[in-house]
Image (cartoon, rainbow, N blue to C red):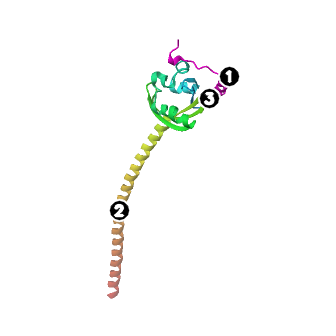
C-alpha cells in the first residue's frame, strides 16, 4: 500500500500527450516550472527547478506540493494562489511570494500559474527574483546614501558660497572706497 505522498496519478492518453508537450516546453525554459495534477501533486519539474531549489526528481515527483522539502513548500501565499485564486481565475500572473527555505534561505519568487481544465493539470512557473530584490534594496540604500551626501555637500557649498559673497562684498566695497579716495586725491590736486 502506498502512503499519501507516493500516490501515482493515472494518466489518460490526452493527459500523456499534453504532458509530453508541456514537459518539452518547460525543459528549455529559463525559469523553474512545475506541472501539477488536480490534487496538487508534482507530476514533473524542469532541471532549473531542481537546481534552484536543490532537490532531486525522486524527492519531487508524485509528491504533494506542500510536502516538498519536508514541508518547506507549505507556504500560506502559495496555498492561497493554488486553492483560492487559481480555481476562480484559471490564470494568475506575477504573484509575488517571499519565503525562507531551510536549505536555500530567503527567496522572493514571482509565480505565474495556469489551470488547464481539459486535462486537469496546473502549470506553475516560478521565477526566483531574490538576487534582483537584494540588488534593488542595495541600490535604494546606495541612492539614499548618495542623497544624504548631496545634501551634506550642498550645505558645504552653500556655506562656502556665503563666505565668498561676504568676501566679494568686502572687496567690492574696498574697491569702491579706493575709487572714491583716488577721486578725492585727484580733486585735491586740482584745487591746489
> Above or below — where is 134 with respect to 2?
below
Question: Mark 3 or mark 2, which is nearer the start of the sequence?
Answer: 3
Disc 2/disc 3 C-alpha distance (Å)? 66 Å
Asked whether residue 111 is in view, the answer is no
The answer to the question of whether label 2 and label 3 lie on touching residues, with beta carbons closer than 8 A, is no
- Residue 40 lies in what quarter of the image? top right
Disc 1/disc 2 C-alpha distance (Å)? 84 Å
Q: Residue 26's mark?
A: 3
Q: What residue do we see at 48% from left, 25% from top?
A: 66
Secondary structure of residue under mark 3: helix
Disc 1/disc 3 C-alpha distance (Å)? 20 Å
The answer to the question of whether label 1 and label 3 lie on touching residues, with beta carbons closer than 8 A, is no
Total label count?
A: 3
**Quadrant of the frame with the C terminus:** bottom left
Q: Residue beneath label 2, please?
A: 162
Main SS class of the magenta portion in the image: helix
Mark 2 is surrounded, within 10 Å at the Cα level, by few (under 14), some (14 to 19) or many (20 or more) other residues, namely few
Q: Is residue 55 left or right of residue 188?
A: right
Q: What residue do we see at 39% from left, 53% from top?
A: 151
Q: Nearer the viewer, mark 1 or mark 2?
A: 1
Residue reaching furthest to the bottom: 191
Horizontal and vertical percent for residue 115?
A: 59, 32
Mark 1 is surrounded, within 10 Å at the Cα level, by few (under 14), some (14 to 19) or many (20 or more) other residues, namely few
Secondary structure of residue under mark 1: helix
Horizontal and vertical percent for residue 52?
A: 52, 27
Q: What residue do we see at 47% from left, 22% from top?
A: 69
Secondary structure of residue under mark 2: helix
Q: Residue beneath label 1, please?
A: 13
- Residue 112 lies in what quarter of the image? top right
Horizontal and vertical percent for residue 99?
A: 45, 31
Q: Nearer the viewer, mark 2 or mark 3?
A: 3
| Extent of the magenta region | 1-26
Amino acid at each position: 500500500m502506498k502512503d499519501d505522498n507516493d500516490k501515482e496519478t493515472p494518466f489518460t492518453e490526452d493527459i500523456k500527450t499534453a504532458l509530453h508537450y508541456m514537459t518539452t516546453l518547460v525543459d528549455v525554459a529559463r525559469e523553474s516550472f512545475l506541472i501539477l495534477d488536480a490534487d496538487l501533486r508534482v507530476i514533473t519539474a524542469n532541471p532549473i527547478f531542481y537546481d534552484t531549489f536543490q532537490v532531486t526528481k525522486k524527492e519531487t515527483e508524485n509528491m504533494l506540493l506542500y510536502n516538498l522539502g519536508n514541508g518547506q513548500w507549505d507556504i500560506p501565499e502559495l496555498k492561497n494562489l493554488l486553492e483560492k485564486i487559481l480555481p476562480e481565475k484559471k490564470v494568475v500572473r506575477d504573484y509575488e511570494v517571499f519565503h525562507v527555505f531551510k536549505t536555500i534561505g530567503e527567496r522572493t519568487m514571482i509565480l505565474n500559474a495556469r489551470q488547464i481544465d481539459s486535462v486537469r493539470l496546473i502549470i506553475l512557473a516560478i521565477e526566483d527574483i531574490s538576487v534582483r530584490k537584494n540588488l534593488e534594496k542595495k541600490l535604494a540604500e546606495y541612492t539614499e546614501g548618495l542623497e544624504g551626501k548631496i545634501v551634506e555637500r550642498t550645505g558645504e557649498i552653500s556655506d562656502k558660497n556665503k563666505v565668498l559673497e561676504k568676501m566679494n562684498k568686502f572687496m567690492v566695497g574696498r574697491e569702491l572706497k579706493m575709487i572714491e579716495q583716488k577721486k578725492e586725491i585727484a580733486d585735491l590736486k586740482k584745487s591746489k
